[in-house]
Amino acid sequence: MAIISASIEANGWVLLVTLTGGPSAAGDFSQYLLDPNGTPRLVVTTTAPGFALSGGVAIAVSATRSLIATKPLRLPVQATAAGARSAKTPDEASLGGGQIRIRIALSQHVYATDTGLTLTALAGWRTGEAAATIAVTNNSTIAAPSPIVRWADVPYQHISNSRAIDLEVVAFSHHPKGFAPIAGVKFTATDGINTATGWATSLTSSPKYGAGGTGVPARVYRVTIDGGTATPAALTEGLIRCDFKAFPWIGTARASDTTDTAFAAVASTGTLSMASLTTAGMAPAAQTPFVIAYDPNGTWLPVLYVYVQPNTWVGTGSIASNVLTVATTTSGAVAIGTKISGVGVTAGCTVISGSGSTWAVSTTAAVATIALQGGGTSNNNIVTVSANALTAANGTCADAYTTARNALKIQNRIVAARNGQVASAIGATDGMVIRVKAGSYAGLGATAVASGITTNYTWEIVEGDPADANPRVNVVVAQGAGGSTRSTRCQFRNMTVVGATAAVPFNATTYGWLDNVEVRGAVGFESNTVQIFGNATNAFWTNLRFWKLGSYFSGQLCRNAEVVSGIAGITVLNCARLPGSSGGGTAAPGSTVDPLGATQDIIIAGNDFRYVKSAPVWAIGFTVNANAGATALGTTYSVFNRQVFANNVCES
């Protein structure tokens, strides 16, 4: 007996071997002694396109692969009579003339681009067979895989008075080498004319977002690019488009720029379009640019701070809520002058100047405008207004949060056009900060903020005072129903938020980001299932604790978080389920609980799910493989496509 020919089926994982001899008896697999876990007796070697490292960058190479024959396939079992079935028999076909054809499963796929295939057979791989080496015909139609990659950070962050651009991705591939999922990642940052480049060729522990969740920092491919090193000139201020191109040891590259079709090359062919950059970085697709608001000199998006502090003023007149301090620096010691002149004041509201004197506005007639500026001799650099001083959208005295945001809005700032983007409308609050002093608050506001606010370039920030020793504990906001923030992007950080009603706490925030925040339900509202943001499809949670609530995370990135309920996210990194957790573990987009729809490149990695006991840890969403038809895949059903569940701890 001898091997006559060998080939790979279109599905890529079946080896067809034609040899002289007779078929096995029904139910008899004993002739096959492949020994895949010992000394494999059938091995297919191929040469596959891939990448390797050289001088700190990836280069295109041809890599050698060895695929092991694991076992012969069997024919379908047939019903021979009621309750009886035929024996399991090897998938062999008699070709006549003393020849048979055998179908054998390989340990990995052969790809359409693999070349130089050779089958090495040891003696005795089938009873009576001699050793042989023979060329293999490659009929595979399966494309070589590209890495599964996601950005591991929150886009549209404000880089002010710095040229350092930090970029991170999390990546996996079908063919890791040791503990290295891929060969490396090339990062680029461009203003549309000038481009800076950086490489990451090994995993590193990220310094971002602490060690919340599992207590372990995320393992990422990370680089810091100096915008001043771009060519032909330094990056200009404005929105910067950042992209990755990830290179596997075996397979094709994957780029965030969808126009880059140089899958087998290190060089890129993409156009790096700057169009629609104010929203392009928020798309849920994996191949999405990472956008930052780059302001190296602090002049394009100058920061203005509004300080909110507990109601401690004891002068004459009434103060219904909190006291605000508006300032242009973090110290609050720069004069505002008449910057907040023109504030509409409703009848019955109280305004307090920096000197502590009071204007008691008529309770029967509204005042259209009032000039607020420092007065007296002891504190003439700071202007304070009562939390109900500014006109709310509904015509009543506004609350603290509404007052603060309106105080920012009426600076009438216009963000200048940069890097192909249009200038903002008047009233932009991008990068402005509402800083909340330590204390307990009855809420940041239920009143809708006056219209006209825009945040098209970076996040507006509401934060616990960083001067406090522990703002996450000491700044407590019992948030009830939230009025419309009218903010495209709003970040809440360094505080505790207590859900005090069954309503949406922060409503109408298109993109919401919670960072270093503890979220819990007030007594009686621990089972509240309402989402934190009215639009939860574009949420980002980093380094927070979310517990004593019945709602769950639903959005793009959940990283280093402790949660008590389910997570419906595209990228879930280093999170932990708390004791007493209920409901499912994670739900990839495409499942019934996630509004984002079917999405490729789902990554759930490095999480601690030991407290998920009575429900599936991973409810997989599915997409149809667009790169191979049902015939090539061997099934007419939808398939799970490009999803990773790796390095997670689970218990039954």
Image (cartoon, helix red, strand yellow):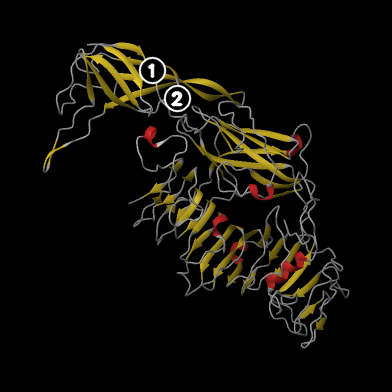
SS for tag 1? strand
Which quadrant does the N terminus fall into?
top left
- Is residue 284 toward the left or the right of residue 373 in the image? left
- Is residue 1 toward the left or the right of residue 221 in the image? left
The residue to which callout 2 is attached is 112
| Residue at image coords 63%, 63% | 471
Mark 2 surroundings: few (<14), some (14-19) or many (≥20) residues within 10 A: some
How far from the left and from the top, in percent, is residue 113?
A: 47, 23
Residue 34 figure quarter? top left
Location of residue 496 with respect to 388 vertically, above or below: above
Q: Residue furthest front?
A: 96
Location of residue 60 with respect to 488 vertically, above or below: above
Q: Is residue 539 visible?
A: no
As shown in the figure, which amino acid type bears the numbered disc 1? Thr
Q: Is residue 273 visible?
A: yes
The residue to which callout 1 is attached is 137
As shown in the figure, which amino acid type bears the numbered disc 2? Ala
